[in-house]
Image (tube, helix red, strand yellow):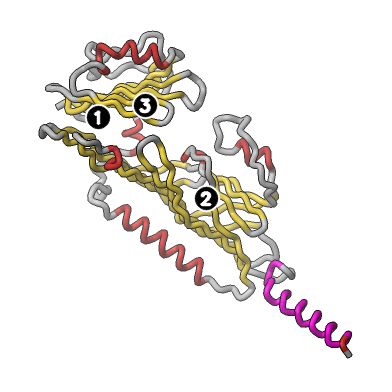
Amino acid sequence: MRKRTISILVAITFLFLTLLGGCSEAPLECDWTIKVDQTIPIKEGDVTVNYSLVLIAQKIGGTDVYGTYEGAAYIGSQLDASELSKEFIKIDGGFDVNAFANNLSFEIEPFDKERYSAYGSKDKASLAPLAKYESMALLSPEMKGGGIIGVDVKAIDGTQGGYNDSGIGASPVAMKIAIYSGKVHVDIPAFNIDRSFEGLITGDPKRNNEEYRQVMEKIEELIAESESKPDSPDDGSRESIGGIMGKFGSSLEIPASFPADEFPILPNSVVINTYESEDKRNVRVMVGTNASLEDILEFYKEYIIEKPEVEKLDIPDGVMYSGRSDKYSNFMLTVMKDMSTTYSYMALLEVMKR
């Protein structure tokens, strides 16, 4: 009698676990949903940059995760520059950059370590992920978005300066989705952070789309919020993101409006980026160089570093000097390591004329 009771309990337990398992325990037809909704704070020097991803995608039908998914995604990065305020200087503003794609479409396929590692990376020898993923998706959706940069600096003596700019545009953004045992990891190489966004993939045999609908509504709200900000484009008057970024290349010509006599270009360097606003008040030149950090700073001592009212700010893998004068509401020198390893360092000179 006891053996029969135990057998019945085992049978009931097995049935119960099977029912709980849903699609994972039996090849039932399901609607498969990928959901990621996370913000990752990254400390960079004295400030924190918040990187966000909201992604929802769904495949209708099927007994496994493989196949074509459709949905939407929103990415953003925000920085609050007030963290840089010191005893005698108050800094307000920061930057807010966001982009979205509401016609997302990609394929989940078996995991390929080499393809996954190389995708979206300038370094083809990029390290492979340590986890043993089962499936993946490699995608580069065309994302629309905008960016607002606004920093105001006020000193205790009443002097002030700042930098404000904004832009809109569209560009493909590489994303890598890796899946293991129902867990989803998403890497966005352009963010250049050492963490993945995490989420889940679920199969629902009841075909309940409530979660999908809720996340889609959240993405639509985020898009509407970004478009309603005071500096957001509503008349096409703002410069495009591509315009703000300027020209990229090798051995570019220096804009005629750049005051190279006051802020000379580093000798034996290569001009790789230039920018000039329409009114020619804001001008920027970036160079690549194999000089040492010490030699670069020694060269600019006379022209920038030792000038009155110049502030120094340590940044990740580099340093920034910012000042002002009667002619310029702001002039800046930024020196940082070249992460692409094409050069040892990149040096950026930028001025904002009064």
Secondary structure category for the residue under label 3: strand
Q: Quadrant of the C terminus?
A: top left
Q: Which of pointers 1 and 2 indicates the residue nearer the eye? A: 2
Secondary structure category for the residue under label 2: strand
Q: Amino acid at mark 3?
A: Lys
Horizontal and vertical percent position of residue 42:
43, 43
Given residues 81 and 57, the one toward you in this image is 81
Horizontal and vertical percent position of residue 233:
27, 48
Residue at x 30%, y 14% (from the top left corner) = 300
Badge 3 local density, few (<14 within 10 Å), some, or many (20+)?
A: some
Given residues 54 and 7, the one toward you in this image is 7
Image side of residue 228 versus residue 41, left or right: left
Q: Which mark is residue 247?
A: 3
Dot 2 corresponds to which residue? Answer: 197
The Cα–Cα distance between marks 3 and 2, rounded to whole angstroms, is 32 Å
Q: Which of pointers 3 and 2 indicates the residue nearer the eye? A: 2
Dot 1 corresponds to which residue? Answer: 277
Among numbered discs 3 and 2, the one appearing first in the sequence: 2
Query: Are circles 3 and 2 on residues that touch, CB within 8 Å?
Result: no
On the question of residue 107 being in view, the answer is yes
Image vertical order of residue 172 relative to residue 228, above or below = above
- Find the magenta span and give its range: 3-24
Among numbered discs 1 and 3, the one appearing first in the sequence: 3
Secondary structure mostly seen in magenta is helix
Horizontal and vertical percent position of residue 102:
45, 56
Among numbered discs 1 and 2, the one appearing first in the sequence: 2
Badge 2 local density, few (<14 within 10 Å), some, or many (20+)?
A: many
The Cα–Cα distance between marks 1 and 2, rounded to whole angstroms, is 36 Å
Query: Are circles 1 and 3 on residues that touch, CB within 8 Å?
Result: no
